[in-house]
């Protein structure tokens, strides 16, 4: 069974309290009944009140490929996903759980907000608006996002501005002179590699630099890496 309610939210928001019957199991032999076999058992034994709370299910033609089924489930925008019963040629079966992309995205986002490191990386990568849209009903999560933005964005913007301003003011120097000046300027020494990239005409990856230096520049510790907001289907399909 699964209990869902507005006050028992884990990932999705459920508008009312409900107890849903997913399956039942015989204690004697371990046999599990679900879907059509479960509803048949409940109906035959007069458990009408329980029957009304069985999780909905449907049959899918064996002409539909597994890849197509998974693709369709991934694209759904309502609910968590499905538990699929795969029936073998000998009539034995096994279960596979497939979540929707929206659910996975929301789950990953909630994890990101609860991890200081994850949240920091998502803000550096300019994903806070996506987080807000997905977590719009979670006031505590929105507050954490705002606080992290206030801590990170001014420092990050100042870093980029000061590096590019220093380069513009001194790009007339020779390479050697520019390198010496950069190294001898306390506020610029830590950005030596970025400054020399600009001097050489190369583009800087300021976001990557900030993430690598999260602890010494922003006071963000931890070895976690941010979970991407867009779920990678191809990567999961290979697992």
Image (cartoon, rainbow, N blue to C red):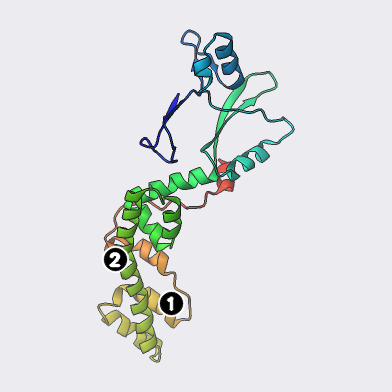
Q: Is residue 122 above or below residue 82?
A: below
Q: Residue at x 31, y 70 (%)?
A: 154
- 82 or 168, which is in the foreground? 82
User: Can you say which quadrant of the picture contains the N terminus?
Assistant: top left
Q: Which residue occupies the extreme right position in the image?
A: 63
- 40 or 208, which is in the foreground? 40
Residue 210 horizontal side relative to residue 219, left or right: right
Q: Which residue occupies the extreme left position in the image?
A: 186
Q: Which residue is mark 2?
A: 217
Q: Residue at x 46, y 46 (%)?
A: 106
Q: Which residue is mark 1?
A: 197
User: Can you say which quadrant of the picture contains the C terminus?
Assistant: top right
User: Is there CB contact under 8 Å for labels 2 and 1?
Assistant: no
Q: Position of residue 111 (x, y in %)?
A: 39, 46
Q: Is residue 149 above or below residue 141?
A: below
- Mark toward the viewer: 2 or 1: 2
**Pointer 1: residues within 10 angstroms few (<14), some, or many (20+)?**
few
Disc 2 secondary structure class: helix
**Pointer 2: residues within 10 angstroms few (<14), some, or many (20+)?**
some
Q: Which residue occupies the extreme bottom position in the image?
A: 172
Residue 86 horizontal side relative to residue 167, left or right: right
Residue 76 horizontal side relative to residue 156, left or right: right
Q: Is residue 100 above or below residue 165?
A: above
């Amino acid at each position: 069974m699964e209990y869902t309610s507005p006050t028992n939210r884990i990932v999705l928001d459920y508008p009312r309290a409900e107890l849903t019957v997913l399956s039942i199991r015989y204690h004697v032999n371990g046999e599990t009944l679900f879907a059509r076999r479960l509803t048949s058992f409940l109906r035959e034994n007069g458990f009408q009140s329980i029957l009304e709370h069985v999780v909905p299910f449907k049959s899918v033609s064996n002409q539909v490929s597994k890849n197509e089924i998974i693709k369709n489930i991934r694209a759904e925008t309502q609910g968590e996903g499905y538990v699929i019963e795969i029936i073998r040629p000998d009539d034995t079966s096994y279960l596979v759980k497939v979540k929707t992309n929206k659910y996975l995205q929301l789950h990953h986002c909630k994890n990101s907000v609860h991890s200081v490191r994850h949240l920091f990386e998502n803000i550096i990568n300019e994903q806070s608006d996506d987080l807000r849209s997905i977590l719009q009903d979670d006031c505590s999560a929105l507050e954490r996002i705002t606080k992290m933005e206030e801590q990170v964005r001014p420092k990050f913007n100042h870093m980029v501005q000061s590096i590019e301003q220093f380069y513009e003011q001194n790009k007339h120097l020779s390479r050697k002179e520019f390198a010496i000046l950069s190294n001898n300027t306390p506020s610029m020494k830590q950005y030596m590699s970025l400054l020399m990239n600009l001097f050489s005409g190369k583009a800087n990856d300021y976001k990557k630099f900030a993430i690598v230096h999260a602890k010494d520049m922003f006071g963000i510790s931890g070895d976690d890496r941010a979970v991407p907001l867009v779920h990678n289907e191809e990567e999961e399909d290979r697992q």
